[in-house]
Image (cartoon, rainbow, N blue to C red):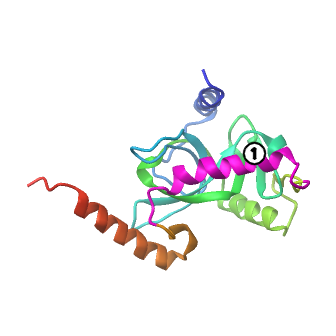
């Protein structure tokens, strides 16, 4: 059993013992398992849902990990009380992007809207510790081992999040992103064979 599967099992057992999570719809603040896009290599990851587009099947997520000692000043560390999981969760605020709702799976925990704002405030420097949200220490130069971990997370996370998206999708605003998404969907539909 891999460490990730052990964490999943522990979280599932904890969630089952504490209280059922009532909502099956993907919601802002959910801590959920996210799968790689269909047909792509990658591994399942625990992610925090930043938002969900109501008129599209897209969710915006931030990747997480469970190693508080590797958190830097761009990471928010949530206590078990904040994440509703039996272990601390590190939210990588710099590793985020859109995913299809179909990639978003089991809900293991939840962060309230206030806590999401606390994450933003803590990482932006508005506060160093807000409602159980803490940030890691700044990286200590190029030799800091946390820098290589963060670089690996960016390499691993970005393809799983964005390789199915048009070039430039992550570099534009919401309105432009919606236009790119609709163009991508139209292109994808033209490629699919007709069932007639």
Position of residue 66 measured from the top left corner of the image (x, y, whole percent): 72, 39
Q: Residue at x 82, y 53 (%)?
A: 72
Q: Main secondary structure of the magenta part?
A: helix
Q: Nearer the viewer, residue 52 or 1?
A: 1
Which image quarter is the N terminus in? Answer: top right
Q: Is residue 53 visible?
A: yes
Choose top left, top right, bottom left or bottom right for residue 128.
bottom right
Residue 14 drawn above or below residue 72:
above
* Element type at mark 1: helix
Position of residue 177 measured from the top left corner of the image (x, y, whole percent): 48, 73
Choose top left, top right, bottom left or bottom right for residue 16.
top right
Q: Residue at x 67, y 48 (%)?
A: 153
Q: Which residue is mark 1?
A: 149
Number of labels in the image equals 1
Q: Residue furthest left?
A: 196
Residue 122 drawn above or below residue 42:
below
Q: Residue furthest front?
A: 142
Q: Alpha-carbon neighbours of circle 1 within 10 Å: few (<14), some, or many (≥20)? A: few
Q: Residue furthest right?
A: 140
Q: Residue at x 47, y 78 (%)?
A: 176
The range drawn in magenta is 140-166
The reply to whether the magenta stretch includes residue 101 is no
Choose top left, top right, bottom left or bottom right for residue 140.
bottom right
Q: In this image, 156 relative to 91: left or right?
A: left
Position of residue 88 measured from the top left corner of the image (x, y, whole percent): 76, 40
Q: Nearer the viewer, residue 27 or 184?
A: 184
Q: Residue at x 80, y 50 (%)?
A: 147
The reply to whether the magenta stretch includes residue 160 is yes
């Amino acid at each position: 059993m891999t460490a990730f599967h052990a964490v999943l099992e522990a979280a599932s057992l904890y969630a089952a013992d504490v209280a059922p999570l009532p909502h099956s719809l993907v919601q802002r603040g959910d801590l959920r398992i996210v799968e790689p896009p269909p047909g792509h290599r990658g591994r399942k990851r625990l992610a925090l849902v930043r938002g969900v587009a109501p008129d599209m099947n897209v969710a915006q997520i931030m990747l997480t990990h469970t190693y508080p000692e590797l958190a830097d000043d761009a990471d928010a560390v949530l206590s078990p009380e904040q994440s509703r999981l039996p272990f601390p969760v590190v939210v990588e605020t710099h590793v985020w992007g859109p995913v299809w709702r179909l990639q978003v799976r089991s809900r293991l925990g939840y962060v309230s809207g206030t806590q999401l704002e606390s994450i933003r405030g803590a990482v932006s420097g508005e506060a160093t510790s807000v409602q159980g949200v803490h940030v890691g220490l700044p990286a200590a130069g190029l030799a800091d081992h946390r820098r290589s971990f963060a670089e690996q997370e960016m390499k691993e996370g970005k393809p799983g999040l964005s390789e199915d998206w048009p070039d430039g999708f992550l570099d534009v605003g919401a309105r432009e992103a919606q236009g790119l998404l609709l163009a991508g969907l139209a292109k994808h539909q033209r490629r699919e064979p007709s069932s007639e």
